[in-house]
Image (cartoon, rainbow, N blue to C red):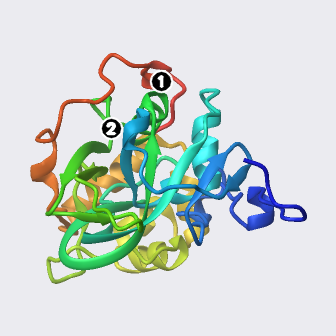
Amino acid sequence: MSKPPGEDRTLRALGLAEVPREEPLLYPGAWPRESGLLAGDRLLPLDRAVYEGDGRVPVLAIGSNASPGQLRHKMAEFGIDAPIPMVRSRVTGLDIGVSAHVSRMGYVSASPVGAPGTVRELFVLWLDAEQLAVIDASEGVPMAGGNFDRAWLPAPDVRVEPGDGSVLRGAYAYVNRHGVLHDGTGAPRRHPGAQRPLITELLHGSARLRALFGATPEEFCARARADRRLCDRGTRLFAEEERVTASGLERYVGSGPEDPFAGGRTPSADPTAPMP
């Protein structure tokens, strides 16, 4: 696709180039305002909303996977530059919670939670085999110590409407193996969509967390970044302080269709593959 004359569709021009993996306080990164085709450094218009017959599968983007800058960064690590359709969709039955783990990227990430009746605007990524393997690796799916499992969320439990009048038969999402943080009542808390207020509140509520990560979001991110043992201690502390609850999506892990790309490329075998 070519861009209309005079229209700059680069991620930088669109305000979508930031990479939370490089600047943790920017998590979850900037999301597009509309659907688009992520093609290298550009976000181009889409000509349709469903790509099921093209050797692609639908994956719900809950956090930074909806950030084109982050998504491009993940793919570039493995030399993958094939375009990715990103379809803004109406999703019923799901909300965005807070992961009950501290990421080695330096932030506290988002995780999906079951929320019957809740309606959110989320992006569906239509990924091919190599792209799915990269995202799986980035979420730790193939690893014993990974933070997420990929689960198939079927309709009508989770209703995904891509905007063309259709309803998907289901979509994949990444369910946190540690659970999610609750809001004090036992219900999953909603991710505020920004790191600074979230980390500030978490630190304010725990002297033990401050002892590990410092008193400010900046200190938290700097100490957590790339320090696996410290992040593991923070993750255990969430559980010890009884801040954790179930996402409500655990029952879907391992219960969906067979892996659509079994036997495909597995970038997670690369020892440099980073996990959130």
Front residue (pair 39, 202): 39
Residue reaching furthest to the right: 6
Q: Amino acid at mark 2?
A: Gly
> Could you classify mark 1 by the number of other residues whose Cα lies within 10 Å: few (under 14), some (14-19), or many (20 or more)?
many
**Side of 160 relative to 21 (left or right):** left
Q: Residue at x 48, y 33 (%)?
A: 134
Q: Looking at the image, can residue 276 be seen?
A: no
The local secondary structure at tag 2 comes to: loop
Front residue (pair 197, 162): 162
Front residue (pair 261, 151): 261
Q: Is residue 222 above or below residue 51?
A: below
Q: Residue at x 55, y 63 (%)?
A: 35
The residue carrying mark 1 is 267
Q: Point out residue 151 in the picture as x, y percentages from the top left corner.
A: 23, 45
The local secondary structure at tag 1 comes to: helix
Q: Looking at the image, can residue 265 be seen?
A: yes
- Residue 124, numbered label: none
Q: Point out residue 120 in the picture as x, y percentages from the top left corner.
A: 35, 75
First in residue order: circle 1 vs circle 2: 2
Picture quadrant where residue 168 is located: bottom left
> Could you classify mark 2 by the number of other residues whose Cα lies within 10 Å: few (under 14), some (14-19), or many (20 or more)?
some
The residue carrying mark 2 is 146
Q: Point out residue 102 in the picture as x, y percentages from the top left corner.
A: 40, 55
Front residue (pair 239, 57): 57
Tell me the CA gap for discs 1 and 2.
14 Å
Q: Is residue 158 above or below residue 102?
A: below
